[in-house]
Amino acid sequence: MLKYVGKCYEELKKGKHIVKVSDEVYLCPYCPPKKKLRYGYIDLLQHASGVGKSSSTKRRPIEKANHLALAKYLAEDLVPVVNSSKPVAQEDPLSGCDHDENRKYFVRTSHGNYRCPYCPEMEKPNYRYVDLVQHAYGVGNSSSEKRTAIEKANHLALAKYLEKDLVPAVSSSKPATQKGPLSGHTHDHDEDIVWPWTGIVVNIPTQRLENGRSVGRSGSTLKDELIRRGFNLIGVNPLWNYHGHSGIAVVEFQKDWPGLQHALSFEEAYKADHHGKKDWGANNDFKYGLYAWVARADDYKSSSIIGKYLRKTNDLKIIPKLMEEEARKQDRLLSYLTNITGTKNKIDLYTPMQKSPSFKVSLTTDISSEDGLDIKESEMGKYVDKSYEKLKNGKYIVKASDEAYVCPYCPEMKKTYNRYMDLFQHASAVGNSSSEKRKPIVKANHLALAKYLEKDLAPLVSSLKPVAPVNPLSGCDHGENGKYVVKVPDEIYTCPCCPEMKKSNYRYLDLIQHASAVGNSTSEKRTPIEKANHLALAKYLEKGLLPSVSSSKPAAQEDPLSGCDDDEKIVWPWTGIVVNIPTWKSEDGRAVGESGSKLRDELISRGFNPIRVRALRNHCGHSGAAVVEFRKDWSGLHNALSFEKSYEADHHGKKDWGASNDVKYGFYAWVARADDYKSSSIIGEHLRKTSDLKTISGLIEEEERKHDRLVSYLTNIVETKTKHEKEIETICSVTSKSLKVLMEEKDNLNEEIKKIQVSARLHFQKVFNEHKKRKSQLESHRKDLELREAELEKREALVESERKRLAEELEENVVQNSVLQFAALERKRADENLMKLAEDHKKQKEELHNRIIQLEQQLDKKQALELEIEQLRGSLDAIRKTGDEDDVVLIIIEASLKELKEKERELEDLEALNQTLMLSERKSNNDLQEARKELINGLKELSSHGNIGVKRMGELNSKPFLEAMKSRYNEELAEEKASEMCSLWEEYLKDPDWHPFKRIKLEGDEYQEVINDEDEKLRDLKDEMGDEVYKSVASVINEINEYNPSGRYVTSELWNYGEGRRATLQEGVEVLLNLWNATKRKR
C-alpha cells in the first residue's frame, strides 16, 4: 500500500489529475460520483485524510492509498500562500486570529469566506460572515430533537466567537482601483440580453435507444466539464422534446455583474475556438464538438425550443436599465444610512438582538378578506394575475430589507426568510402542491408571489451589505382621543381586547405579532368579532402608533451613567438580584416560593421594565433568591440602577441585607457586580454561566469603535460606488461607438447570411429527403431479411427432421438389405418385361396406326364405291322408266348389277374388318390409358424428375393470393385472408353452373371458346386482387375446360414442364428407366 501511495503521489505531482481549479476551488480526482465536486483547501485536505485513514471495511485499500497520496500532495505541494504584496490597509485587523497556532478549529477559509467547523458534511462549505452567524444561532437555539445538546452548545460557542473575536472590520484607507463589471469584454450596453444571464450550448452528442428516444449527456456532467474549464456557473439544464434529448442545453450564471463577466468569458472562449454562434450558423458540411454563446434577443424571440424555454424562465433587459435599478437601490440605502448615523446615541445598531438570526420584525401584511374566499381550480389563473397586480402595486410587503423577506399569505408562520431563494422555494412549493389540504386560493396566492419574486424582486447582487432596519421600539404616545389605552408607560404596550390574558404587558413588536396572529387565526375558537378587533388593533399599531426615531434628545431623559463608576466592573447583560423571597415546604418536602413571572409583573408595575425574572433553585427546591434580567442597552442599565436605588431608598439594598440585623422582612435587591459574580453561592454560579463582567467605560469604547468602523465602512462604499459609476459611464461611451461600427458590419453581413441560410436550408432539405428514402429502403430490406431468416429457420427445421428420418430409413434399409436385393432382382425382371411390353406396345401402336391409315383409305374407296352404286342404280331406274328394251343395254345393266353385288359384298367384308380393327384399337388404347395412369401414380410417389412430372390440372395456386394480401395486412393476417380467398375461388371453380367462356369465330367456319373478360366474378377479382391473381385463376379455368370440362374437379396429368405441354407415354417411360439406372448405379 505504501508503494502505491508513492506511485499515486508521483502521478499527482506530474499533473496527471486535476486537483486545483482556482485559488479557492479544489477537486477530488478519486471521487467523481460524489455530489460535492468543489472543496476549499482545508475541506479537501480533511476529506483526503479522513478517507485515507479510515478503518471502515467498505473502503478498499486502493481507495485509501489514493486519498493518502492526495493528502500528502496537498500538504507538501499545494499549500496556499498568502500574498505578501497585499496592502496593509486592506487587511482585516482581526485576520491574524485566523492563523493562531493554538486554534483547534479553522473557521476563516479566505478573505471574506467562512466555514462551520462543526458541520463538515454540509453541501455549502463557504459562508459570508453574517450567514455563518445566522447559521450558528439557528442551530444553537434550535428546538428540534434531532439536534444534540453538544451540537447546540458548539454552535452557540461559534456564534459567541464570531461576535467577539472575528467581527469583520472595514479599512478606512481607500481601496485599490476596481474594474468595471464588463471590463475586458466588448459588449453593447443598449443590446437586449437575456436576464438572468444565460448561456446556450448546442451540438451535444446524442444517441437513440431501442424505444426510439434520444439520450445525451446530463446537466451535471456538462456542469462539471464547464467548471473544470474555469467557468463559474450555477447549473446546466438540458432541453428535452418529444423525441428525448434535443442536443441543446442552457447554462445559468449568477444574477450579478461577476455572473455577466463569467457569461461573456464563456462566450469568448468558445468564439476563440471557432465554436461560437457565427460558426454554428456557418454553412459548413460537418460540425464537431460543442458550440456555445450568451443568449440574446434573437434567441429569446426564436420559435425553437430555446426560445420557448427562455420566454418561460427569463426576460429581456439592457445593461443601462439594470445599472439604473441598482443605482436607485444604492441611493435609497445611502439616504437611509445618512438618517441613522445622525441618531447614533438613540439607536443601538449592534445590539445582540439584532445580531441574532432569531431577531424578527413584524411587517405590514394587510391581507384583504377576499383572500379567505373559496375559488375553483379553473379560476386560479385569473386570481394569480389579480394577486400579482396587488403585489406589484405594493399592497403587501414582501421585502423587509435586502436580506429579509416575508410571506404575506402565511401570517401564522412567524418566520422571516433571510434569503431570496428560501421564500421563492416556499412560494413555488405551496403553489404547485398537490395536497388537498391546500385551498385553490392559497395556491393561487403563492403562485402569484413566486411570479412577483421572479419578475420584480429578483435580486441584483451588490457589493453593499444592507444595514439592519431602524429599531421600531423607540416610539411616541398616541393621540388623546383613544378609547382604549394601548401604550401604558414608555416602550410598554397592552392589548385592550384581551384583558383576561396573564401577559398584560408587551413590547411593540410582540403586540403587533399577537394582534396579527389572532386576527388572521383560522381557529374556530376565535369569534369573528374577536378577530376583527385584533385586526383593527394591528392596523392602529401600524398606522397610528408606529414608533419613530427622534433626532433630538428628550430633555426629561436622565443620563443612564449618573451615579455610576465607569471603571467599576458590573455584570453584563445587566442583571438584578432579589433575595429573601418567602418560601415554604410542600408535601414532598421541597421548598417552593413565588414564581418568576409574578415577580416580573410586580417589578413591571413599579416601572422597572425587566425582561425576565428567574427564580434560582437548588437540590432542596426554591432557594429564596432570584435574578432579574434587564435589556442589554443603556435604557436597560437605567432601569437596573433605578431598580437598585428604589430598594436602597427603602433600606432593602445590598448593604441593608449584609447588616447584622436580627429580623429581615420583604425583598432585598441590588444590581449584580463583581463580588456577586465571583461568589461561591448559587447566585455566583448562575451569573458565571450566563453573564460576563464588563466596565461601563469599556462598553462605551466598544460602541465608539463600532460606530467608527461603520462610518469608515460607509465612506468607503460611497467612494467606491462613485468611482464605479464613472467607470461605467466611460464603458458605455466606448461600447456605444463600437456598437455603431458593429451595426454597419452587421448590415453588410445580413445579406450574405440570408443567402447562406437559404442554401443551407435547401441542402438540409435534400439531405433530409435522401435520408428518408434511404431509411425506407433499409426498412424494406430489413423486413425481407427477417422473412428470409424465418424461412431459413423453417427450412433448417425441415432439414433436421428429414435428416433424422433418413437416418432412421438408413437403419431400416440395413436391416432389410437382403429382402431388398431379392426385390431388386424381381423388379429387374419386371422392368425387363415392362420394357418388352413397351416395345411390343410401340410396335402394335405403329401397326395399328398404319392399319388405321389403310382403313381410312378403304373407307374412302367404300364411300366412292357406294356413290358409284347409287349412281348406277339411278341410271338403271332411269333406263327402266324410259322403257328402252334394248338387249345390249340390258346386258350392260345385268353386268353392272353383278359388279354392284360384288362391290357390295366386298364393302361388307371391309366393314367387318374395320369393326374388328376398331375393337382392337380401343382395347389397345385402354391398355395405354391404364399404363399412363399407373405411370402417373408411380411418379407421384417419387421426387422431382426434371422436366417430366405430374401436374394437377385445375388446381388453384395460393401463392399469388398470399402476395396480394401481404401488401394489405401483416404476415399472420395475410396468410389467413389468402387462405379464405383461395378456398372461395376453389368453390367457384367447382360450380358446374358457372361457365365464364365465350365463342369467337376464327377463319372459315371454325369457332373457339375463350375466357369471357366481362364476367362479373372475374372482373371483380381483377379489380380487387390484381393481374397476377387474375392470370392464375384464368389459367386454372382453361385447364379445367380442356382436361375435365364435365367433372370440373382436379385431375393429374403427365406433363412436360420444359415445353409446357402434355407428356407422351414414351417420355414418362424414359424418365422411369433413367431413375432405375440411377438407382442401380448407387447400389
Image (cartoon, rainbow, N blue to C red):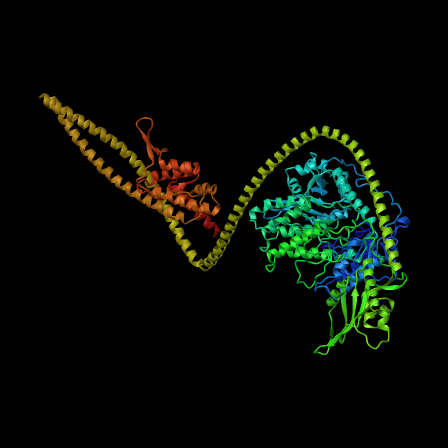
Q: Is residue 740 above or below residue 107?
A: above
Residue name at image x 84 percent, y 67 percent = 648
Residue 6 visible (yes or no): no
Number of disc labels: 0
x and y percent of residue 33 in the render? Answer: 72, 55
Q: Is residue 117 above or below residue 856?
A: below
Question: Looking at this rendering, what residue extends furthest in the front direction?
Answer: 480
Viewer-proximal residue, 348 or 971?
A: 348
Viewport quadrant of the N terminus: bottom right
Viewer-proximal residue, 314 or 83?
A: 314
x and y percent of residue 815 in the render? Answer: 45, 60
Residue 735 visible (yes or no): yes
Viewer-proximal residue, 220 or 872?
A: 220
x and y percent of residue 996 in the render? Answer: 34, 36
Left or right of 475: which side holds 175? right
Left or right of 331: which side holds 1058? left
Q: Quadrant of residue 992?
A: top left
Q: Quadrant of residue 385?
A: top right
x and y percent of residue 814 in the render? Answer: 47, 58
Q: Quadrant of residue 845?
A: top left
